[in-house]
Image (tube, grey):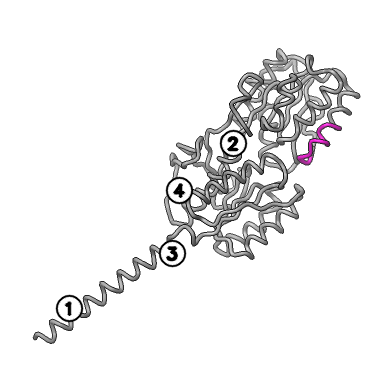
Amino acid sequence: MKKKLMSLILAAGMIVSTLAGAVTVAAEEADNSDFTIVTIVKLTGVAWFDRMEEGVNKFAEDTGVDAYQIGDTTADPAAQVQKIREAMDAGADAICVVPNSTESLEEVLKEAREKGIVVITHEASDVTNADYDIEAFDNAAYGKHFMEEQLGPMMGGKGKYTTYVGSLTATSHNEWVDASVAYQEENYPDMELVSNKNETTEDSENAYNITKQLLQSDPDIIGFQGSAMTDIPGAARAIEEMGLQDSTFCIGTSLVSVAGQYLETGAIDMISFWDPALAGYAMNELALKMLKGEAIEDGMDLEAEGYQGLLLKQNDKGANVLYGQAWIDVNKDNMGDYDF
């Protein structure tokens, strides 16, 4: 009887020891440093994505995750596909992508997910092959506010205006412009849209040349709305060279570090943006939650400012999209509050 009891005690001890070992292994497996998250941006060498990289690096520092950012020197969708493949081949557990063309990336994103890689996108609310897309805000609301709160009132609801997009395939840029134009048509019928969606390929020089050509062919254009960070600085350069800064209205998405000199002169009247560093942080934070099996749900909070009480919706392709409330409006008076 004593022998049997001793055998039972030893067996129980082995079970406890095995369970303890399993817990230890699980804890080791859950160590953040075991995870690699790669952020792939539209292109490198521009202020917007330099700032995003600060957020990615801060996330890595805060969490211990092997998190880093890569991108090509051009805004070429094919080059971005190659960068995603490089991240897959390097053993990424998750990839966070800001697409140049959502459609062009669908196949490679599908491949990544089939390999068990978590896929998070940003500025791609029409994506199909992502676990989650996370947006700084609802794109239609952001686009509407350009016309409702900025360009429409500035122009007094009258006159000709034009719009720019970094790419005709950039989802967010097109959604902003479409919402802005729709609001104008309904609320400012005396405004006239001229040359909608001038494609700049995210290049300030292209925006500059397009604006010069537009003003030379139609000097009555007084309103300019940009989408890519480089759009309105390029437009403003042309406006300033032609001495039109006091008679035109130039607004759009940019950063103080890029547009500040034109805010000072009045060639740009107002810029809006979300902090790319916070967006980079939020993407990686969301990816880590998925890797650790945490719940992703409507109303959830992330650490990144502006990404609390997230609204979870499904797009018309059945993919999950999370919306924050993170846009900022800046003019000459408050531009000193921002150092990026």
Task: Answer with mark 1 or mark 4, whichever residue precedes in sequence.
Answer: 1
Q: Residue at x 68, y 53 (%)?
A: 105
Q: What stretch of residues is rendered in magenta?
A: 201-209
Q: Is residue 220 magenta?
A: no
Q: Secondary structure at mark 3?
A: helix
Neighbour tally class for label 2: few under 14, some 14-19, many 20 plus, Cα within 10 Å: many
Residue that mark 3 sits on: 29
Residue that mark 1 sits on: 9
Q: Secondary structure at mark 2?
A: loop
Q: Is residue 202 magenta?
A: yes
Q: Please name the amino acid that badge 4 sits on.
A: Ile
Task: Answer with mark 4 or mark 2, whichever residue precedes in sequence.
Answer: 2
Task: Answer with mark 3 or mark 4, whichever residue precedes in sequence.
Answer: 3
Q: Is residue 318 visible?
A: no
Residue 58 shown left or right of residue 162 in the figure: left
Task: Answer with mark 2 or mark 3, whichever residue precedes in sequence.
Answer: 3
Q: Is residue 164 above or below residue 105?
A: above
Neighbour tally class for label 4: few under 14, some 14-19, many 20 plus, Cα within 10 Å: some
Q: Residue furthest top?
A: 156
Tell me the quarter of the image containing the N terminus.
bottom left
Name which quarter of the figure residue 23 lies in. bottom left
Q: Please name the amino acid that badge 1 sits on.
A: Ile
Q: CA distance from mark 2 to mark 3?
A: 32 Å
- Residue 140, horizontal then vertical, whole percent: 61, 32
Q: CA distance from mark 4 to mark 2?
A: 22 Å
Q: Residue at x 64, y 65 (%)?
A: 89
Q: Residue furthest right?
A: 217
